[in-house]
Image: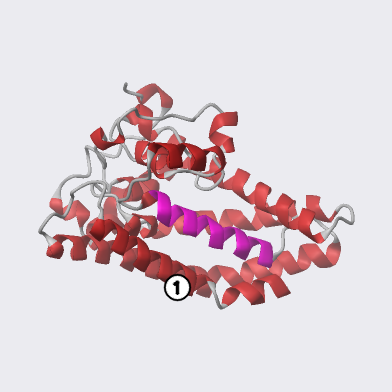
Amino acid sequence: MDALFNALSGWRWPIAVSMLFLLLLWESASPYFLFFRKRTDNRLRHGGRNVFLGIFNGLVVAVVFVGLWAKMTDWTAANGYGLLNLASIPFWIHVLAAFLMLDFWTYWWHRFNHTLPFLWRFHKVHHSDPCMDVTTANRFHLGEIVFSSILRLPVLLLAGATLGELALYETLLFANTQIHHANIGFSSVADKVLRIFLTSPNMHKVHHSRLLAETNSNYTSLLSVWDRLFGSFRLRANPHEISFGLDDTDQPNQQTIPGLFLMPTEKNNPPITPQNHQS
């Protein structure tokens, strides 16, 4: 494991927890949508479910996959394998190129989760949240996390990225993911400036819309450039009108922890594909 990973390993959880706490305060003081007005109990249950999934998934990744990623990155570095190891390049260029490659993969992995029916069965757990807030950034099915973690092995092999570069990327990725899921609003000018570079709250609100044409847009989780390059960028004139969730996941039993775990097994599980777009 490299020095960059060691430097970040002690900071990743404190950063994530601190941002969660600060964004929860922001949502409480100035919520963009009034999901939980005078219903603190509903908010606690909603957030508790989402955070439980995040902690559970994080433990599985830490126990099962971090060691595998470390072995893969150590092997590529020792054997000069991967695009970034084909030639000697400065450290900062190596880090920047690894960052771009990892974010490029993240964009396409997210897009595949919307277009491949099998993957959508798991990813819909994330989209089934009718009250998107900062805790929704933790709401993923274990199956999606496992598939993503396994596929990261060949990505690291081909890219030649280090474990520290992966840790840096994921730290920044999750920080931005918490921001653009949060039930907060930036001014139109601030959001416009932010989305020149990063996925902004208004961009990601559109992505969580019940309208399938909007759900199948804005796949980026960090750098917004990929949506512009690959024709998936979309905005809504008035984000306040967006309704979150999925029409086939509104039953109360589906919004429980057991229901979320079993959601991929449901028979009524239509994939989100381009031919199903609605406008």
Q: Is residue 22 magenta?
A: no
Q: Is residue 51 visible?
A: yes
Residue 127 percent location from the top left of the image: 33, 45
Q: Amino acid at mark 1?
A: Leu
Apparent side of residue 155 relative to residue 215 in the rendered image (left or right): right
- 139 horizontally vs 103: left or right: left
Query: Which residue is the extreme one toward the left?
Result: 38
Left/right placement of residue 57 relative to residue 35 reads right
**Magenta stretch in the rendered image:** 163-180
Read off the residue under disc 1.
59
In the image, is residue 63 above or below residue 219? below
**Neighbour class for label 1 at 10 Å: few (<14), some, many (≥20)?**
few
The residue located at (53%, 48%) in the rendering is 222
The C terminus: image quadrant: top left
Q: Is residue 101 above or below residue 13?
A: above
The way the protein has been coloured in the rendering is secondary structure
Main secondary structure type of the part rendered in magenta = helix
Percent from the top left, x then y, of residue 50? 30, 61
Closest to the observer, 136 or 33: 33
Residue 116 showing in the rendered view: no
Locate the N terminus and report the quarter of the image it occupies.
bottom right
Q: Find residue 209 and report its horizontal and vertical position in percent.
A: 31, 36
Seen at 56% across and 47% down, the residue is: 106
Give the quarter of the image for residue 89: bottom right
